[in-house]
Amino acid sequence: MKFKHTFHVFVDNFSVIYKQLLYRLIIAVIAFLISWGCLTPFITEFINSQAFNSLTSGIGSFVSELLQGHVDMLAQISSNISVAYEQVLDLLNTRMTQIVLTAILLLFVYIVQKWFTGLGNYTTAVIINDKMALRKTSPFINTLISHFKEAAIYNLIYAPLTVLYDVAIAVALIAVLFFMLNGMGYLFISIFLFMLIMIASIGVKMTFTCDWLPALIRGKMGQKKSIIYTFSRKNKNTINVYSNFIVLELIILAINVMAFFFTLGVGLLITIPASYVILLCFEMVNYYDSKELKYFLDKYTIIKSEKERVITREQFFRGDDSDED
């Protein structure tokens, strides 16, 4: 039922996808330009180096001679390529400090980008909540400005935590993938297990953080209490929530892959922001259902719990439901 209600809420808030798209594009372009500015000096120096030019010219000569059938020259060219490769490694070793500093700077840019995109997610969640609770259509920019303080503090905590989790999972997955390829030798099975572990780990992260935003926005709990509430899984049907997230992940992955191949990537302009919006819709629906709060699916449909809790307008803005477990 949660999945069905999530889809209805998603359709009811479909227009926010375009606002998410524009906001994310602006943030992505700015982050790309800054990252490119950080990488350009190193890339320019590397590409113009004699070692790199020797390596690329050697590879080009090898391919050319192979296509022409001059196999007698391949041994000498391979030797030259090996020498050039060693020179490239030596060049990278001499620039290790620069590489590390650039990597740290890029990681910082990525965290800041996550922080800004998180502001957009917070704003989107507020807009979804306003539509679910009050049938109010809130403007994106005004909502972002009016909730900037709460969104900034939330993302100041959430963004670094998710980046650390994502980096740890990425390193673990790469290690697992290389281990599988070396130990098993079956590419398809290795990729299958890689994707299985990745989807499962993302589901864990979303399950344990899914109540954070709704508790802040609808429950008005405050940062500390929201964090405690989201990681406390008592009486929250964690397995059910986790399974729903897994299904959503698979659907989102399939739709984005199809959009990439069948529309040459153009469809991703809609499917990527839509992916974030539907996940936020599920988080809000899950919170409303667990708190037994009534909400609008659309203009004509209201979802009520079997034991409806009557909450006055004053109680809603005070967030009296935040004391419920």
Image (cartoon, rainbow, N blue to C red):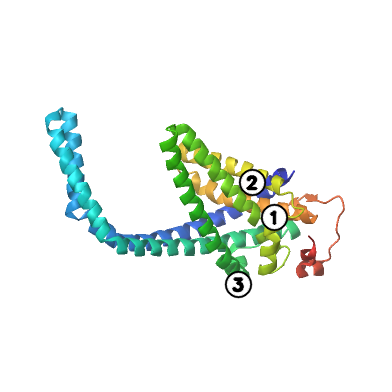
Which residue is pictured at 55% across the width and 39% down the height? 254
Residue 70 visible in the picture: no
Q: Nearer the viewer, residue 18 or 154?
A: 154
User: Circle 1 — which element?
Assistant: helix
Residue 205 visible in the picture: yes
Q: Which residue is mark 2?
A: 245
Q: Which residue is mark 3?
A: 149
Q: CA distance from mark 3 to mark 2?
A: 29 Å
User: Circle 3 — which element?
Assistant: helix
Q: CA distance from mark 2 to mark 1?
A: 13 Å
Specify the farthest residue to the bottom: 149
Vertical position of residue 298 compared to residue 69: above or below? below
> In what quadrant of the picture does the C terminus appear?
bottom right
> In what quadrant of the picture does the N terminus appear?
top right
Number of other residues with Cα within 10 Å of mark 1, as a class: few under 14, some 14 to 19, many 20 or more = many
Vertical position of residue 77 compared to residue 171: above or below? above
**Mark 3 or mark 1: whose residue is earlier in sequence:** 3
Residue kind at label 1, given as amino acid type: Met
Q: Which residue is mark 1?
A: 284
Number of other residues with Cα within 10 Å of mark 2, as a class: few under 14, some 14 to 19, many 20 or more = many
**Foreground tag (2 vs 1):** 2
Q: Nearer the viewer, residue 283 or 209?
A: 209
User: Circle 2 — which element?
Assistant: helix
**Mark 2 or mark 1: whose residue is earlier in sequence:** 2
**Mark 3 or mark 2: whose residue is earlier in sequence:** 3
Q: Looking at the image, do the residues carrying marks 2 and 1 touch, with CB atoms under 8 Å apart? A: no
